[in-house]
Amino acid sequence: QVQLVESGGGLVQAGGSLRLSCAASGRSFSTYTMGWFRQAPGKERAFVGSIAWNPGRTHYADSVKGRFTISRGNAANTLYLQMNSLKPEDTGVYYCAADPTVYVSSSPGSWDYWGKGTLVTVSS
């Protein structure tokens, strides 16, 4: 059974940093693209960034470029999101996603597997 479990969310002041983790299990994700989405209260789920399995190319939403960094652990079944210079508008539930065929897609409907999310709250 495929499972994605996010962790690392919490409350942080504007300008601070957080590192989210996603632990994937149930199969090998070494050939999957993995990504992060977020959903702010009252808004639709939005693409944050992704990392393809080969050659590990990353893509980011314009709103987080230069502040957020996606990486994968050595085992490939772990995904990270380093978030720096956080802003109140970064507040939301952050979801980990994985898909075997997507190279890059900002559409949530393109992704097969999802975690349950972790809440990030950035105070001003």
Image (tube, grey):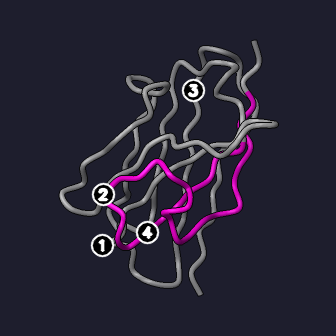
Q: How many residues crowd around disc 1 within 10 Å: few (fewer than 14), some, or many (20 or more)?
A: some
Residue at numbered disc 4 = 99
CA separation, marks 2 and 1? 8 Å
Report the residue that reaches farthest toward the left: 55
Could you tell me residue 59's position as x and y percent?
34, 41
In which image quadrant can residue 117 be found?
bottom right
Q: Which of label 4 and label 3 is nearer to you?
A: 4
Question: Which amino acid does the dot numbered 3 rest on?
Answer: Ser
Q: Residue at x 54, y 65 (%)?
A: 23
Mark 1–mark 3 CB contact (< 8 Å): no
Residue at numbered disc 3 = 17
Question: Which amino acid does the dot numbered 4 rest on?
Answer: Asp
Q: Earlier in the sequence, mark 4 or mark 1?
A: 1
Secondary element at image label 2: loop
Could you tell me residue 45's position as x and y percent?
65, 46
CA separation, marks 1 and 3? 29 Å
Write the start and end of the magenta stretch as one range. Answer: 93-121
Q: Is residue 74 left or right of residue 98?
A: left
CA separation, marks 4 and 2? 10 Å
CA separation, marks 4 and 3? 27 Å
Could you tell me residue 55's position as x and y percent?
18, 57
**Tag shown at residue 31:** 1
Mark 2–mark 1 CB contact (< 8 Å): no
Q: How many residues crowd around disc 4 within 10 Å: few (fewer than 14), some, or many (20 or more)?
A: some
In which image quadrant can residue 9 be found?
top right
Question: Which amino acid does the dot numbered 1 rest on?
Answer: Thr
Q: Which of label 1 and label 3 is nearer to you?
A: 1
Q: Is residue 124 left or right of residue 57?
A: right
Mark 4–mark 3 CB contact (< 8 Å): no
Q: Earlier in the sequence, mark 4 or mark 2?
A: 2
CA separation, marks 4 and 1? 9 Å
Mark 4–mark 2 CB contact (< 8 Å): no
